[in-house]
Image (spheres, grey):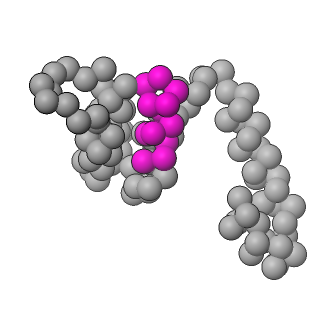
Amino acid sequence: MEDRLRPARGFGRPSTEEASTALRHLVLADSPLGDRVQQLVHFGQLPARCRAEPARIHARGALHAGAGIADLIGVAETALITSGTPSYPLGLEIAAELRPDDDDHGPVR
């Protein structure tokens, strides 16, 4: 937030950024979706906008909130239908990065 607030202050418009931040907190903190689904939604939307690093952050947030790698792959597949490429390969790349290393490469959760 501070990175966005600094230029807003410089131009005498901090109230807009503060209101945007408050709205974001209200929508995310009080969402009926819950943390897991909310993080998965963010993960699905960000690759479609070619926002790889924020997508990685929300993918990790989804895993932390109880999602599995299979959930991330399912979201990436859905993004293929709704957003096309490059969202699908980017989503798969992120899911692969976050998959725990294992020797048997069995089913993912």
Quadrant (top left/top right/bottom left/bottom right) for the C terminus = top left
The residue sitting at the bottom extreme is 10
Q: Can you see residue 84?
A: no
Q: Total label count?
A: 0
Question: Which residue sits furthest front?
Answer: 103
Q: Is residue 88 left or right of residue 28?
A: left
Q: In which quarter of the view is residue 25 placed?
A: top right
- Give me the residue at 40% from left, 55% from top: 52
In the rendered image, residue 62 lying in the magenta stretch gets the answer: yes
In the foreground, 87 or 82: 87
Residue 36 placed where, x, y %?
52, 26
Task: Establish if 53 lies above or below 105.
Answer: below
User: For the N terminus, which image quadrant?
Assistant: bottom right
**One can see residue 60 in this view:** yes
Image quadrant assignment for residue 23: top right
Q: Look at the magenta stretch and give its main secondary structure.
A: helix
**Residue 13 in the image, given as x and y percentages of width and height:** 84, 70
- For the point 60% across and 23% down, the residue is 33
- In the displayed structure, does residue 41 sit left or right of residue 15? left
Q: Tell me the quarter of the picture where residue 43 sits.
A: top left
In the picture shown, does residue 32 fall above or below 51?
above
- Residue at the image point whose x is 37% and y is 25% from the top: 68
Front residue of 64/15: it is: 64
Residue 83 in the image: above or below residue 14: above
Q: Which residues are magenta?
A: 56-67
| Residue at the extreme left | 104
Q: Position of residue 40 (x, y in %)?
A: 47, 33
Q: Find residue 50 and report its horizontal and vertical position in percent.
A: 39, 57
Residue 64 sits inside the magenta stretch: yes
Q: Residue at x 48, y 47 (%)?
A: 57
